Image: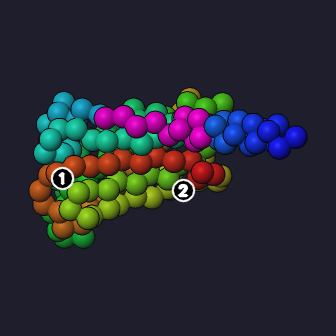
Amino acid sequence: MKLQRSMLMLTLLACTWILSGCATGGATVDTSASTSGLSCSEAGRIDVQMAAEAEVVGLNCFFKDYKGVKSLHFDVKVKNVSSTDQRYRVNLFLDNGKAVGGLLPRKGKPPIVKPGEEASFSYPLQGMAERAGNVTLVVKTVSQ
């Protein structure tokens, strides 16, 4: 009886571990061919941790004034690849300790991205007038 219970617990633990590993995938995006002509990171690569319900279809970087200061902006475009309506939490972490993020879409009634549709937003890093070193992009669903 104890052996059966132990095997059941072990099986449940293994399934939970496998499913949690499949929920977010680690990937690296090459940003050297950004449409702005500016690589988003000095190394030209960005680490991406993404929910299974999302796909990053656009990532662009550019400099623009934000509140009167030249600042680096990240333009992120996400596509809903699931079969249900989603809202995403987007975070960008830089190796110098700076971070920026928010909800995508920001507004709406209700604020959702329908299956197959895309949403984008430009995230400014106020006062950062140079390219980032290493960048990590995290996209999660709000329910996660």
Identify which residue is drawn at 56% across, 47% down.
Answer: 141
Residue pushed farthest right? 1
Q: Is residue 97 above or below residue 16?
A: below
Q: Secondary structure at mark 1?
A: loop
- Residue closest to the eye, 5 or 45: 5
Q: Residue 132: give its label.
A: 1
* Gap between marks 2 and 1 measured at Cα: 28 Å
Q: Is residue 13 magenta?
A: no
Q: Is residue 87 above or below residue 79?
A: below
Q: Secondary structure at mark 2?
A: loop
Tell me if I can see residue 78 in this picture: no
Residue 18 rendering spot, x and y as whole percentages: 59, 35
- Residue closest to the eye, 113 or 136: 136
- Closer to viewer: mark 2 or mark 1: 1
Point out the stretch of residues depicted in magenta. 17-28
Q: Residue 3: give its label.
A: none
Identify which residue is drawn at 31% across, 42% down.
Answer: 47
Q: Is residue 79 above or below residue 133?
A: above
Residue 65 rendering spot, x and y as whole percentages: 19, 62
Label 2 is placed on what type of residue?
Lys
Give left or right: position of 29 versus 89.
left
| Callouts 2 and 1 close, C-beta under 8 Å | no
Q: Report the residue marked by disc 2.
A: 107
Residue 1 rendering spot, x and y as whole percentages: 88, 40
